[in-house]
Amino acid sequence: MKNRVWMFAGVLALGIMIVGCSSRVPESSPDHPVKGVNPDGTPKWVNKGSGAYEGDHGKAFYGVGLVTGIRNPALARQTCDNRARGEIAKMFDLYVAAMMKDYQRSTTAGDFKASAEEQDVVSAQKTITEVVVRGIQIHDHWTDPANGTLYALAVLPLDNVMKSLKDMRNLNTKVRDYVRANARRAFTDLDKELRKRTDRGQ
C-alpha cells in the first residue's frame, strides 16, 4: 500500500513538473530567449549583442556593454552598465529620429511653415529620448572566466516607452499621438535595418 502511495506521489510530482516546464521556459534552460546558455557556456545575450528585437521582455531594445582591464570591481561594473545603457541610447535615438522624419513627411500634405515644423520635430525627438532613456534597466551581468571581461545587459521594453509617453505633458499632442500609433511599426523597421547592417558587417 505504501509503495502505491509513493508511486502515485511520484507520478503526480512528475506531472506537475511537466506542466510547469511546458508553460514557462526556465531561465537556466538553453532555450530561454535571453538568459539561455550557449554550448560554450556564455549567456545567449552576450553573443547576440545589442539590438531591437523580440525577446524575454517582448519587443525591447537590448544593450550589451563590456569592460576589461579595470581592477576595481565597483568601477568596472559602473563603466560596463553605462556602456550597455549607451548602446540602447544610440539605438533609441536612431529609432526616434527615423519616426520623426516619417511624421514630418506626413505633415507636408498640410499647410505649415517648414522651419516651425522642423523645430518642433527636433524638440520632440530630444524630449522623447531624454525621458525614455532614463528608464533603461540593467538586467544581467556575466564575467568571462577566460579573460575576466565583464558584460552587462541593459533592457528598455517598448511597452515602457509607450507608458512614458503618457507623462510627457509638454510634448506636442499630434507628435505624441503619432508616436503612440506608429511605435511598433517603427520598431519592426528598426529591427530589420539593424539586421541588415549586421549581415553587411557594419
Image: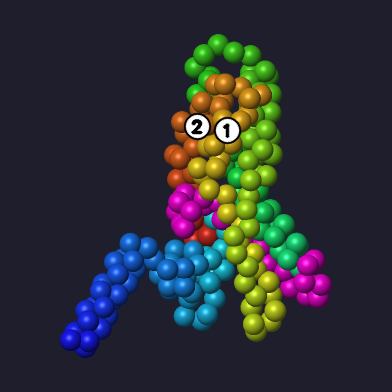
Q: Looking at the rendering, which quadrant does residue 2 occupy?
A: bottom left
Q: Position of residue 55 (x, y in %)?
A: 46, 57
Task: State the CA–CA distance, disc 1 to disc 2.
Answer: 8 Å
Taking 144 as reference, is 198 left or right? left
Q: Amino acid at mark 2?
A: Arg
Q: Secondary structure at mark 2?
A: helix
N-terminal-most mark, 1 or 2: 1
Q: Nearer the viewer, residue 59 or 118?
A: 59
Residue 87 lies in the magenta stretch: no
Judge whether 137 appears above or below 77 on screen: above
Q: Looking at the rendering, which quadrant does residue 1 occupy?
A: bottom left
Q: Which residues are magenta?
A: 52-75
Q: Are marks 1 and 2 in contact (CB under 8 Å)?
A: yes
Q: Position of residue 197 (x, y in %)?
A: 53, 56
Report the disc number at residue 165. Answer: 1
Q: Residue at x 64, y 78 (%)?
A: 144
Q: Amino acid at mark 1?
A: Leu
Image quarter in which the C terminus is found: bottom right
Taking 99 as reference, is 20 left or right? left
Report the residue marked by disc 2. 180
Q: Residue at x 50, y 42 (%)?
A: 159
Q: Secondary structure at mark 1?
A: helix
Taking 37 as reference, is 129 left or right? right
Judge whether 57 appears above or below 36 on screen: above
Whether residue 20 is visible: yes
Q: Residue at x 50, y 32 (%)?
A: 180
Q: Position of residue 117 (x, y in %)?
A: 63, 20
